[in-house]
Image (tube, helix red, strand yellow):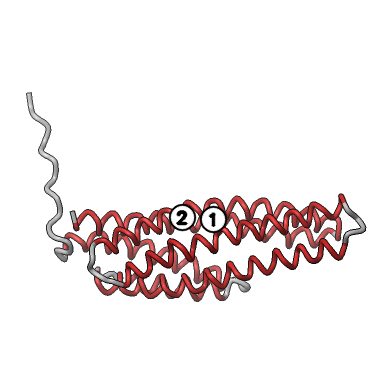
Amino acid sequence: MAYNLHVEGLSLLRKALLVSVVASLVIGIGNAATSLGGLFGPRALTGAFMISAVISIIGILINLYAWFLQYNGWDRLCRTQIESFFCTTTLAVKWGLLASIVLSFLGQLVMLSAIMSIGARPGAGLGIFGAMAAGGGILGLAGLISLVVAIITLIAYFKIAEIYRADNVKWGAILVVVGVLLTFIVIGIIIAIVGYVLLYMGLGDAISNVGRLGIGGQAPPPPPPPPSY
């Protein structure tokens, strides 16, 4: 049973990583739409903001699935009782990351509503500006909560690297954090991509090492061969 919890937990974290990358790409496309719209004047910029908000909402919904996978992954590792900090990470992901995703969704909805009001209510400039500022504040709060959860998760990945003898998890997590902090330049994106690859490979190494290191007991025996007739 314990062996299965280790493998299932690490596998779910690996899947969550892939889904998170997809969500980040979608949100990145939305942000790029805004930048492109700014090249064609104010009218095009308004449309680009609207498209960006819709795409970002889709990315946030994809992130919700990544949250579900990540929460279940940490929860299984917590239930192995091999490291108490995994239970702390489970709570941080369950409530903190969920709150961040919900706030991001609400913030984008407020921004989208304000942008859509520009054409419908030409004289309501101050109200629209206030709504956009409120939406930005909600997004900022979501980002702050997400940062706290990211720090806790980074520590938990260090624990995984130590327990399962998977150094790529540690280096991958470090590069992902550095890359995200430097996303405003091209090298930051490259660093993040390398980090995600290392982290994905490292989690695969950790899964392999569960049985090799005898963590959680012995692996379940393989199924019997089919009967021969």
Q: Nearer the viewer, residue 74 or 172?
A: 74
| Residue drawn at x 37%, y 59% as measured from the top left | 13
- Answer left or right for 124 relative to 167: right
Q: Which residue is mark 1?
A: 23
Tell me the number on the disc at residue 66. Answer: 2
> Outermost residue toward the top?
229
Say above or below: 116 vs 206.
above
Give the quarter of the image for residue 103: bottom right
Q: Nearer the viewer, residue 155 or 186?
A: 155
Please, what is the three-letter code of the amino acid marked with disc 1?
Answer: Ala
Q: Position of residue 193 (x, y in %)?
A: 49, 65
Crowding around mark 1 (Cα neighbors within 10 Å: few <14, some 14 to 19, many 20+) is: many
Decide: marks 1, 2 in contact (CB < 8 A)?
yes
Q: Position of residue 184 (x, y in %)?
A: 63, 73
Q: Position of residue 67 (x, y in %)?
A: 46, 57
Q: Say which label, 1 or 2, has the lower sequence index.
A: 1
Please, what is the three-letter code of the amino acid marked with disc 2?
Answer: Ala
Say above or below: 138 vs 26.
below
| Residue drawn at x 80%, y 58% as measured from the top left | 45
Q: Position of residue 194 (x, y in %)?
A: 45, 67
Give the quarter of the image for residue 26: bottom right
Q: Nearer the viewer, residue 191 or 28?
A: 28
Mark 1–mark 2 distance (CA, rounded to whole Å): 8 Å
Please state which of the two labelled residues, at mark 1 or mark 2, is closer to the viewer: 2
- Answer left or right for 220 relative to 166: left
| Residue drawn at x 22%, y 63% as measured from the top left | 209
